[in-house]
Amino acid sequence: METVGTVVGAVPAPGLREHRKRLTRDALVRSSLELFATRGYEGTTVDDIAATAHVSQRTFFRYFASKEEVAFYVPHLAESLVVDAVRGRPPGEPPLDVLRGALRESWDGINEVVEQVVPLELHLRVYRAIESTPALLAAHLRRSSELEERLARVIAGREGVDLDTDPRPRILVAAVCGVVRVAERSWSAGDSGLAALRELTTAHLDQLGPALAGPWSGTRPTAG
């Protein structure tokens, strides 16, 4: 007696269906990044991506709402690692140490997460192009602002402070993310790998002042 999975024309089992969806999504991401790296972001259309991935335009839009969304799919995975790492830091750890520690932890997993989808070298080539591509840079800055708000809310929740009345979570996160952007800008001008970006970011973070480094418990911001 044949099982459902072997009957011709039968609906694939959920595990197989999800696997096929992941393969299609990853093929679209890889095709997109390869085209962005060779033709440029502005020189690539959704039709180009679909054709390279051997799917229809309709299939593309079942997975991604826009060319921008697929361009930032891999960075989104990396950002999610950071947010999860912040949530998992030890209770009572000072907020600046939380963010520093979360960045260190997430760095260790970024390579693996990226290479599950695309070659790391391809991801880095496209990521470097952000600074020189106005549409990508604008999207990157907007998305960075959204990430900062997510992180600020997590920090506020950990510290038991009201984000609407206490500006410190947003100030801290803006400072740390600003450091990361400065490091990325310097790194993107060269041709070094991800390890160099990690070292540069760590060195820049070490220069943040002690005003943000201490514990916050039992203190309130001073009006200036």
Image: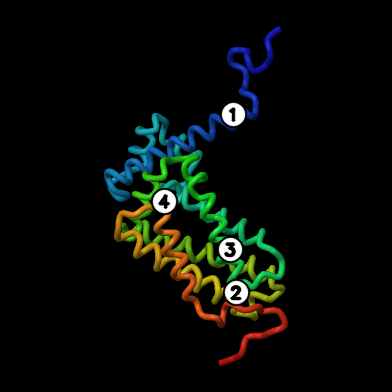
Q: Nearer the viewer, residue 3 or 151?
A: 151
Q: Quadrant of residue 152?
A: bottom right
Q: Quadrant of residue 128?
A: bottom left
Q: Secondary structure at mark 4?
A: helix
Q: CA distance from mark 2 to mark 3?
A: 16 Å
Q: CA distance from mark 1 to mark 3?
A: 37 Å
User: Which residue is label 3 attached to?
Assistant: 101
Instruction: Give yes or no for contact between labels 1 and 3 (Cβ–Cβ under 8 Å).
Output: no
What's the mark number on residue 68?
4
What's the mark number on residue 17?
1
Foreground label between 2 and 1: 2
Q: Amino acid at mark 2?
A: Pro
N-term-proximal mark, 1 vs 3 = 1
Q: Is residue 60 above or below residue 206?
A: above
Q: Amino acid at mark 4?
A: Glu
Q: Residue at x 68, y 84 (%)?
A: 219
Q: Residue at x 39, y 29 (%)?
A: 54
Res. 143 in view: yes
Q: CA distance from mark 2 to mark 1?
A: 42 Å
Q: Amino acid at mark 3?
A: Gly
N-term-proximal mark, 4 vs 1 = 1
Q: Amino acid at mark 1?
A: Arg
User: Which residue is label 2 attached to?
Assistant: 169
Foreground label between 1 and 3: 3
